[in-house]
């Protein structure tokens, strides 16, 4: 939570509001005060109370900018109601304010009119008073990078003369993230942390950049710095949970997803991953409860909706309901018709429901329709592997490496496991070495149960040579 909400200035106003004492003492809570209070309630998981405050503010201050924007944002981002959001934003009297202009651009972006939004923001820049130009340019750049419009954000950032300001550097760092230039981004956020080592925002940004750069352990450490500064920082909770999940530390990840859900009970993502972990731990009943909660909380335009439907399909399959499972695959495809991986999910469900012929047709369709996309091939191969169809998985892995060569980083550990099961220890050792070198996380995920608990990946080859395969030909 923002440190402002712990300040005496804010807490005094919150206590006044909650005690209903402001008017009694002839004091006025202005629109920005009421928006701060609503924002506090929203961040502490009390959305209903937040909306009560905002509706009160809109009634008391008709035409005010900040309360109407708060409610418009709620309609846009929670309810997915673009027209409702536009209606409430149009009630704002001061349509020349930068807050109104930035939200109007955001409405255009969410209405799939990103180009129009960029043109509008440039037009408004020409109308801004000279003393406000730099602040407007920074705000516009910050908004555009939130929607991953890196070139457009950089256009406005180049209009800023104070390139040493923290805000300028933060936006520059986020532009590098969107462009996949993670090391450049990390360099900027480390510079900012040298200036302000207690900024949870900078630690969270650094953690996100490290996660995207597959530097998972460092990402977790950065999240832990945030949590040491503010134990209630929900973004750090989620970052840490995602890092632990990626490393396969599912039980510890579950603890942090649970904490995230306590702090953000209306956000679907925590429930989604709790459901996935329950499936991994072979608890489909509990997984169903979590995934149903995720579906219920997700807005119609949620970026997680396809994943929710995907996992609901799998859990219904595990519980023996083929019709419902395939129904959720269909719902996911209505949202993302170009996601060929969903055809792999359909194949996986059919295969595990003893519809082997139809399943193999779906695997083939997914791969051919994708233009032999290597990510789809490996999804099919791992699906076959997980379903214990090792010979078919073997074929797909060989297809993958024929297309991409042995330096392709994914799939080697699973292919090694297929060859191990078939007694081909020569190929197993070769593929395991490649996996250890190119993708140690996958090597651990696919091969760990062949070794004593806690064996580091770096010791896998030595253990095989000296113990597991000692005396065998390979």
Image: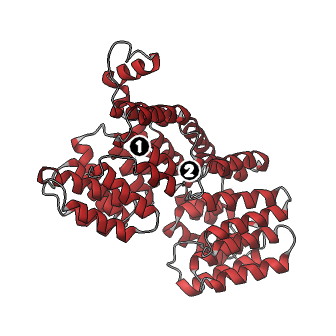
Report x, y in % for residue 182: 35, 62
Residue 260 visible at all: yes
Q: Which mark is residue 81?
A: none
Identify the image quadrant of the N terminus.
top left
Q: Nearer the viewer, residue 463 or 162?
A: 162
- Gap between marks 1 and 2 measured at Cα: 15 Å
Report x, y in % for residue 443: 58, 63
Q: Nearer the viewer, residue 28 or 389?
A: 28
Report x, y in % for residue 313: 74, 61
Residue at x 77%, y 82% (from the top left corner)? 361
Relative placement, left or right, of 84 versus 432 is left
Q: Nearer the viewer, residue 32 or 329?
A: 32
Q: Residue furthest top?
A: 25
Residue 453 visible at all: no
The mark total stands at: 2
Q: Which residue is mark 2?
A: 79
Relative placement, left or right, of 172 versus 455 is left
Residue 195, placed above or below residue 206: above
Residue at x 78%, y 69% (from the top left corner)? 388
In contact (CB < 8 Å): disc 1 and disc 2:
no
Residue 123, placed above or below residue 288: below
Please tell me whether mark 2 sits on a helix, a strand or a loop: loop
The colour scheme applied to this rendered structure is: secondary structure
Relative placement, left or right, of 346 versus 444 is right
Report x, y in % for residue 214: 45, 60
Q: Which residue is mark 1?
A: 68
Residue 105, placed above or below residue 294: below
Quarter location, residue 469: bottom right
Please tell me whether mark 1 sits on a helix, a strand or a loop: helix
Residue 256, placed above or below residue 231: below
Q: Residues within 10 Å of mark 1 (few under 14, many from 20)?
A: many
């Amino acid at each position: 939570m923002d440190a402002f909400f712990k300040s005496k200035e804010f807490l005094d106003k919150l206590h006044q509001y909650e005690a209903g004492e402001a008017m009694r003492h002839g004091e006025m809570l202005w629109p920005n005060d009421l928006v701060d209070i609503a924002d506090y309630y929203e961040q502490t998981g009390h959305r209903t109370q937040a909306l009560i405050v905002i509706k009160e503010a809109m009634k008391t201050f008709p035409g005010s900018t900040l309360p109407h924007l708060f409610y418009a944002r709620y309609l846009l981002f929670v309810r997915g109601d673009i027209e409702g959001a536009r209606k409430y934003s149009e009630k704002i009297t001061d349509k020349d304010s930068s807050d109104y202009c930035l939200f109007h651009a955001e409405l255009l972006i969410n209405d799939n009119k990103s180009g129009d939004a960029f043109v509008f923001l440039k037009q408004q820049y020409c109308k801004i008073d000279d003393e406000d130009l730099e602040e407007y340019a920074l705000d516009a750049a910050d908004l555009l990078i939130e929607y991953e419009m890196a070139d457009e954000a950089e256009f406005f950032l180049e209009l800023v003369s104070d390139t040493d300001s923290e805000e300028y550097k933060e936006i520059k760092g986020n532009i590098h993230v969107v462009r996949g230039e993670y090391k450049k981004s990390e360099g900027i956020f480390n510079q900012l942390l040298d200036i302000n080592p207690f900024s949870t925002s900078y630690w969270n940004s650094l953690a996100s950049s490290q996660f995207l750069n597959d530097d998972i352990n460092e990402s977790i450490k950065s999240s832990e710095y945030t949590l040491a500064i503010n134990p209630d920082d929900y973004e750090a909770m989620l970052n840490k949970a995602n890092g632990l999940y990626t490393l396969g530390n599912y039980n510890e990840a579950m603890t942090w997803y649970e904490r995230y859900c306590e702090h953000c009970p209306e956000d679907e993502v925590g429930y989604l991953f709790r459901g996935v972990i329950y499936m991994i731990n072979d608890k489909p009943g509990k997984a169903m409860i979590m995934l149903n909660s995720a579906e219920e909380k997700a807005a119609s335009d949620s970026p997680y909706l396809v994943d929710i439907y995907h996992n609901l399909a799998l859990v219904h399959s595990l519980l023996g309901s083929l019709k419902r499972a395939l129904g959720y695959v269909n719902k996911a495809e209505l949202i993302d018709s170009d996601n060929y991986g969903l055809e792999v999910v359909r194949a996986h469900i059919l295969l595990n429901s003893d519809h082997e012929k139809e399943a193999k047709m779906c695997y083939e369709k997914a791969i051919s329709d994708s233009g032999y996309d290597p990510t789809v091939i490996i999804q099919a191969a791992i699906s076959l592997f997980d379903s214990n169809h090792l010979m078919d998985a073997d074929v797909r892995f060989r297809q993958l490496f024929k297309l991409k060569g042995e330096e392709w980083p994914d799939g080697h550990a699973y292919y090694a496991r297929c060859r191990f099961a078939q007694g081909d220890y020569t190929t197993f050792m070769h593929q395991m070495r490649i996996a250890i070198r190119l993708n140690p996380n996958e090597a651990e995920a696919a091969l760990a149960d062949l070794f004593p608990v806690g064996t580091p990946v770096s010791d896998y080859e030595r253990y095989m040579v000296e113990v597991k395969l000692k005396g065998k030909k390979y």
